[in-house]
Image (cartoon, coloured by chain):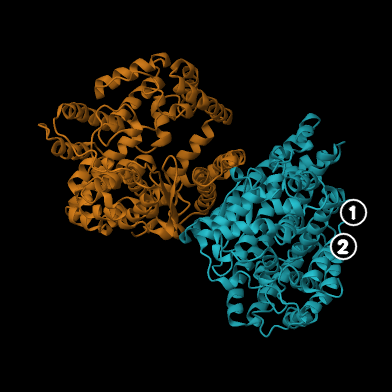
Chain colours: A cyan, B orange
């Protein structure tokens, strides 16, 4: 894997006004505090003994307030003002655009409100845990209502004239229009609802228990397998590590992007798939240009693009038949009991559709997006004041029935299942589905340019794909806004078309669907 | 092991002026940045992949400058000024005293000078590495000269009227008079020089190869043994971890104090002894009062006291015959090949004196202090302008001959052996020997109060000792200056008397010395 080199890194200092140097210097400090924070969070989830929480909470709180103070410093505002009155190179203009957006948001929201949201989240978390355990939505409703009110107030501070949901969405996806996002989510819903209904009625019987019927899989061997898959995919070990975490994630910098996974002793596919997913996140981080570290040109283009990289590797590589043709022998080396599994049955096992599953985090590649669409539609209605908090459970259950053909019997397995609303996060969920759609569009473009990649994937040769992704996505950092990045990489605006084509073909073949 | 509770933590807020709250609030932020820095350094030495250095260096540099900016903020100075004009409780006065000292030092030294020292250290490190490899002191001399000049300038900024070595010593040991430190080091030298000469002439043949004659010791089993010794000594695993590092250290907070060790496959005593040493450091950190976390009352009383805790556990427990009577069976469980080793021969093996060793880091409990005294005397003469850099090698070799009866044949195994001067650290070494002297005085006082502890040590019962140390040392944090802390704990001023008694008795018996 090659780390990208930014043209920007070189060009910047040649023609830069002094205020640009000041701006970058200030931003690098902010960036260092943030990546240090990332390391503290990694440690908290991976290494920290349980007793460490009181000190860690205080450390994180101090670093968070320092990052805020650095960002809202007058030096930053003055440098931005000065630069906006000057002739800038494209790279410089992109840096100013990125920092301006962050700065304006940070200064617009009173710190008392930020603290109130934080306090509400602290109180809402145990309330949510208890409400979920007791299946008691009414006990959680006041916290959800409070969060909705506070977040509407938050959005009003940033821009009182715009749709508050749009403003919140931009906290997670600042450079993609909500209009485009909504259109993509609608296309996904329109394609998947009938497809999943057809799958439910299909009589095809996939080899879903290819691995799970063979007994247990010891953790140490699963970990060795995960290390092997990372090496096969091209993970640069001198710039990363693999560890265990109860909620797998990836974090770090281009110099040190770490991945985590978790193990289920009845099924080695879980740790393997999650490792490949986190590998995708890490490749993006690794592909950011070293020489732009600490500036927006060395930072990721937000959550959907990040998720596109994890989903591309997880789904388009790790869930492909070509991959299983090549990688199955490695699995069998670690687990000789799987000697009789064929690439075809492994492929079926990783691609089964759980058409009766109510739980997002246990969903498959296909139904997953309807879980997302439902949350998106409900959040948007809540924030826009079109849905009352008290009516959330019924709206939730109706949508599950409409989109997935199943109705939760309890709120614990319905609208109380996810932690995110206790944090007060609204606008985050859509980035998961947007990432899948973008992955499909990028992978199709890579194959259009490089030719079908099945032979390389089966042979464990990923250099060409890595180079294409680094060249077209990673090395640009946050230079382009999201649609422009996709358009430059693929030749087309960002849509759900490639994703719909991909799932229609793949699942049409797997389930022998008429529509395919 | 019980975590201490500070009376201070409770008393502070009852009667505190507003400026005291402000001061504590500011200081807690500084403390959080520092402990976050400690975690980044721990990760760097224990977990970070090699490629991570560029980002980590920048993160550390940003956090260091932020801590400096927070400390030198006008709010801190104003709060100190206000508090110094008020009636304060003893605890409040101690807090003000501690922060005032730090504040005055931080504002006295121009940041350009701090940067120049830092730059010189960056350049001196590779120069020292090469000079040591090439046995070429002259190549390193210019960097050492530069460091001496800069550190004299640094000391002059802090106090132009005082001995510059004294000022530098206070960077590491701010609350112990140099006069007392010098007197302790002189007493140690006067006792040890003739004792080591006698040992050199002794015909006693200790069982030095009790373990090393038995083949190799696999790392995994050594690590399990180190975990067992930590558990035996009372390490609270819910507030710590054991990992591997090339240079073992301990770091953290009262909530999460971690230890590291390293393994030598020819000798399990190395990892075991270093684990017990770092355990001692961690017990001190664990014993600091939880409720004073982030304030001087929850911080350690500097390096000598810290080292007293590590040396107490390493030497007075881990190198005692009673300990080996109790713990040897655990070693033999892990390494059945050591079944014939007796407690007496294990005791001799961990206490052998390497009378022909030139290298500090390979020294034993006894000769170690002469390595320290030599560095102390040379540093002090350098900083006072009584010794020219060019004359360091000869002064070094003469002192080795005089104190240890051996003369280095090369500067690589002479004055170039340690890394510290390339960092520009002068005044740090003495704290090692001061720690040993303090350990002996504290352990003698504990035994005077609790009765001889041999039976408890042999039985693996350390609760009474932990309680005594927490009550008399740990829970006070930095409330008392060093000598007062020792005097309160032991009833006497801090001297080398107890240490001299301890080594005279122990090594007199081991080597059948006339002087004992």
- The answer to whether one can see residue A161 in this image is no
- The answer to whether one can see residue B321 in this image is yes
Q: List the residue tagged with mark 1.
A: A492
User: Is the residue marked by circle 2 packed among few (<14), some (14-19), or many (20+) residues within 10 Å?
Assistant: some
**Residue A430 placement, left or right of B410:** right
Q: Pick out the residue farthest to the front.
A: A340
User: Is the residue marked by circle 1 packed among few (<14), some (14-19), or many (20+) residues within 10 Å?
Assistant: few
**Cβ–Cβ below 8 Å for labels 2 and 1?**
yes
Marks 2 and 1: same chain?
A: yes
Q: Could you say where residue A327 lies in the image, as x and y percent from the top left?
A: 65, 56
Q: Residue B152, relative to residue B52: is it above or below?
A: above
Q: Nearer the viewer, residue A173 or B185?
A: A173
Q: Could you say where residue A205 lies in the image, as x and y percent from the top left?
A: 72, 77
- The residue positioned 82% from the left and 63% from the top of the image is A502
Q: Quadrant of residue A441?
A: bottom right
Q: List the residue tagged with mark 2.
A: A497
Q: Pick out the residue farthest to the right.
A: A492
**Residue A140 placement, left or right of A101:** left
Q: Quadrant of the C terminus of chain A?
A: bottom right
Q: Quadrant of the N terminus of chain A?
A: top right
CA gap, disc 2 to disc 1? 10 Å
Q: Earlier in the sequence, mark 2 or mark 1?
A: 1
Q: Residue B247, relative to residue A453: is it above or below?
A: above
Q: Secondary structure at mark 2?
A: helix
Q: Secondary structure at mark 1?
A: loop
Q: Could you say where residue A131 lies in the image, as x and y percent from the top left?
A: 61, 79
Q: Nearer the viewer, residue B66 or A418?
A: A418
Q: Which mark is residue B387?
A: none
Q: Nearer the viewer, residue A276 or A494?
A: A276
Image mark 2: chain = A
Q: Nearer the viewer, residue B15 or A318?
A: A318
Q: Could you say where residue A298 lies in the image, as x and y percent from the top left?
A: 72, 43
């Amino acid at each position: 894997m090659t780390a990208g080199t930014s043209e920007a890194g070189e060009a910047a200092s040649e023609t830069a006004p002094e205020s640009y140097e000041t701006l970058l210097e200030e931003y690098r400090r902010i960036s260092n505090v943030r990546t240090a924070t990332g390391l503290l969070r990694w440690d908290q989830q991976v290494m920290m003994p349980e007793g460490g929480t009181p000190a860690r909470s205080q450390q994180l709180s101090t670093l968070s307030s320092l990052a805020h103070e650095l960002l809202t410093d007058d030096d930053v505002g003055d440098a931005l003002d000065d630069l906006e009155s000057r002739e800038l190179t494209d790279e410089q203009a992109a840096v100013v655009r990125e920092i301006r957006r962050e700065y304006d948001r940070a200064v617009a929201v009173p710190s008392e409100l930020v603290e109130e949201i934080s306090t509400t989240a602290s109180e809402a978390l145990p309330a949510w845990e208890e409400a979920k355990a007791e299946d008691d939505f009414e006990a959680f409703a006041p916290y959800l209502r409070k969060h909705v009110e506070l977040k509407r107030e938050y959005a009003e501070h940033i821009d009182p004239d715009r749709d508050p949901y749009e403003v919140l969405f931009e906290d997670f996806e600042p450079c993609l229009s909500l209009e485009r996002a909504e259109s993509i989510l609608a296309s996904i819903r329109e394609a998947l609802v009938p497809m999943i209904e057809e799958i439910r009625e299909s009589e095809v019987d996939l080899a879903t228990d290819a691995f799970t019927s063979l007994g247990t899989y010891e953790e140490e061997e699963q970990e060795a397998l995960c290390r092997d898959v990372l090496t096969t995919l091209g993970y640069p070990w001198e710039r990363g590590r693999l560890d265990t975490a109860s909620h797998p994630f990836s974090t770090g910098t281009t110099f040190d992007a770490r991945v985590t996974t978790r193990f289920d002793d009845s099924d080695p596919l879980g740790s393997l798939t999650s490792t490949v997913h986190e590998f995708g996140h890490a490749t993006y981080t690794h592909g950011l240009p070293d020489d732009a570290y600490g500036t927006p040109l060395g930072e990721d283009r937000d959550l959907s693009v990040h998720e596109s990289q994890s989903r591309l590797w997880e789904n388009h590589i790790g869930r492909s038949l070509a991959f299983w043709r090549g990688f199955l022998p490695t699995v069998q080396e670690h687990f000789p009991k799987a000697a009789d599994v064929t690439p075809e049955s492994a492929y079926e096992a990783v691609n089964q559709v759980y058409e009766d599953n109510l739980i997002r985090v246990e969903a498959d590649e296909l139904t997953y997006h309807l879980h997302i669409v439902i949350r998106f539609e409900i959040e948007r209605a809540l924030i826009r004041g079109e849905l009352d908090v008290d009516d959330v459970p019924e709206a939730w259950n109706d949508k599950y029935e409409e989109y997935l053909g199943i109705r939760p019997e309890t709120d614990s397995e319905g609208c109380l299942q996810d932690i995110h609303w206790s944090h007060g996060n609204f606008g985050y969920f859509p980035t998961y589905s947007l990432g899948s759609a973008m992955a499909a569009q990028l992978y199709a473009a890579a194959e259009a340019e490089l030719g079908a990649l099945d032979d390389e994937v089966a042979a464990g040769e990923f250099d060409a794909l890595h180079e294409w992704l680094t060249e077209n996505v990673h090395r640009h950092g946050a230079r382009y806004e999201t649609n422009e990045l996709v358009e430059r990489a693929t030749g087309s605006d960002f849509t759900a078309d490639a994703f719909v084509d991909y799932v229609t073909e793949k699942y049409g073949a797997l389930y022998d669907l008429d529509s395919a």
